[in-house]
Image: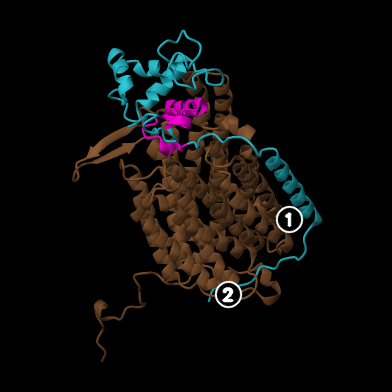
Amino acid sequence: MTRKLRPYDQPPKRKRTLIPNAPDSAAGLFLVVAILWLLAAATLGILAAGERLFPDVLKFSFSVPLGRGINIDISRATVDPAFVDALVFGWLTNAAFAAVFFITPRLTGRRLMSDAVANMGLAAWNLALAAGIALLYVKGASSVGSLAEFPWPVKGLALLGLLAVNGAFWRTLLPIGGLPYISLLYFGIGLLALLGLFALASIPSVISLGATNDQLLWAFTARGIITYWVLGATLGALYYVIPRVTRNPLYSGGLALLAFIGWLAFAGLSAIGALIDPSVPYAITSLGQAGTLLLLAPTFLAIANLLATVSGRWSLILSPGTMQFAVAGLAFLFVSAMLESVGALRSVQGLTAGTDWALGVLVLGLLGGSTLALYAFADHAFPRILRRSWSEGFVVHAQLWTAFAGAALAGLGMVGAGLVQGSLQAQGTSPDQLDLTLLAFRLVAAGGIGLVALSGFALLVNVFLLYTEGPPVEYALPPAEAASAAAG
Amino acid sequence: MTPHAPIPTRPGLPRWALGLTVFVLLVGGVYVASNLSGTNPAIAAGPSASPGAGGGGGAAAMALINQAGCKACHGPDLGGVPPTFPNLHGLQSGPSVDNLKQLGQQHPKDWMNIWITGTDPAVSNPAMRKGMPVFGGPPYNLTPQQIDTIVKYLLTLK
């Protein structure tokens, strides 16, 4: 006779660890956290746009009776950096980390070393980011540098997170001999640049180099983070997703390498172009601005290579999903690269300095190009991480079109506002008249960011439906003759 | 085991790509060669560098401040370069330098407008009327409304 065991006498079915270490756990967690940050960033973006429309209504300043009292300030001065930080470090960086941890094992054939370390990086990075953004609203707690506002203990925690992410990536990649696939080259340089530039931007928190030098350093590192990390990770993800989905070989290895070398050289030069001050030799700044101008070439070469890879499979963009996101992302990337190049010219800067132009071009690149490229990656990766297949539906269409229309409206609204502002200022228009004229542009920009927020919400709903209702599916190794068609 | 397959890559490099690269490098070279001498403007502080910048009016004021060149003397964050160029933060309670305190007492409401435009606006030479040095000819010919915008903004700096 056997006696039935009570539930608590039964051994656990599987061992659960405090820090997940299952394959793809880091990629999945980074991606989910990234989507939450996208929603937060878009909400802050709507608030930032609202601050431009109703500055007095949306300005709050109050004191929290804690200790000696904490003064909270919610105004454009605090909402603008919170929006950019949440967008760049929250949404784009977490999604790009997910791409790194999803793609690297699939291209190297090695398990990630290790998912647990990557997940510790996730915890450190996101805790630091949340604390840093919260402290932006506390008067006197943060610096004023672009993408470098966090106080030094927060930066220290974020640096630990970046070290863990770099460690997990490099320990997987380094044992592989030979030149890795182009995506991994972009990821490697991008990760090292992010770590180095973030560390560099932390120097003034410890030792001030003087007000002007601190500002110059932050301008350099902020520009470098965008050109090296965000642009590099975006291209790296697209170089993986497009050949995988189309099942075509990459159009040209030589072209990819030429574009990579160009990006490596000009992304750094472009960061030097941000050093605009009388203390910096004019020729050095001009050289940097030429770097931004020249960065158009590698970006264009990469886009051309990827579009040529789609050759023969264009029908894929007629069905909702990865390819639609990828091609839309490439279109935004091209437009923003063109505008960046034009905006680097001194004659154009004379017109657009101090206007919404620069933020508009940034929004086109980040909310348009990079966001849509990472949507393409998420659309490709989520079914493989969750082992479930998408069910076609309205939500995917909604995600694409709200992101597309939102990024276009927000970016072009701000770029237009910048041009109009610059022209009217040159004519000596009064500030009140100026604000009135810019109202329509700013309303369009606010609406656009709202649409991007809706697209993030649609992605979250889509992932929830995939997790709860998607039919299970196995992504097995393909037959040898179709290896390129590929799994993963 | 993670499903793994390399992505095949076609070898070779299209000639047009080389041509385009050479062309763009030439354009960049011409741009640098034609922009070798000059003086950069003062670094523009980002939106977060202007605590209290109030929305559209604040942005317009910042643009005017950049345009007028105030930062050239008062620093990129308008924090001043003591003792010659005073700090423009914390002016809500009146002038911070001794030689302006009398002006502040005589004109508590508009001492900053007078300080910027000069004590005798009828005198055309800005150096003679003791206004801000950059408040001279174009492009610094600010209207009274534009000066009002700058003053309102400066009064928000703490």
Instruction: Residue lying at the far top in this picture: please name it.
Output: B122
Q: Which quadrant of the figure contains the N terminus of chain A?
A: bottom left
Picture quarter containing residue A464? bottom left
Q: Is residue A290 above or below residue B58?
A: below
The residue type indicated by label 1 comes to Ala
Left or right relative to A233: residue A160:
left
A175 or A364, which lies in front? Answer: A175
Kindly report the distance in space between the C-alpha atoms of the residues bearing marks 1 and 2: 27 Å
Left or right relative to A462: residue A325:
right
B119 or A5, which lies in front? Answer: B119
Query: Tag 2's secondary structure?
Result: loop
Chain B: what color? cyan
Q: Is residue A396 visible?
A: no
Q: Residues within 10 Å of mark 1 (few under 14, many from 20)?
A: some
Chain A: what color? brown
Asked if both marks, 1 and 2, belong to the same chain, the answer given is: yes
Instruction: Residue lying at the far right in this picture: please name it.
Output: B15
**Residue A226 location (% of width, % of height):** 54, 50
The residue at which mark 1 appears reads as A308
Left or right relative to A249: residue B129:
left
**Residue A174 location (% of width, % of height):** 56, 73
Q: Residues within 10 Å of mark 2 (few under 14, many from 20)?
A: some
The residue type indicated by label 2 comes to Gly
**Residue B134 location (% of width, % of height):** 49, 22
Q: Main secondary structure of the magenta part?
A: helix
Residues in magenta?
A: B45-74
Q: Which mark is residue A109?
A: 2
Left or right relative to A67: residue A160:
right
Residue B52 lies in magenta, yes or no?
yes
Residue A227 lies in magenta, yes or no?
no
Chain under numbered label 2: A
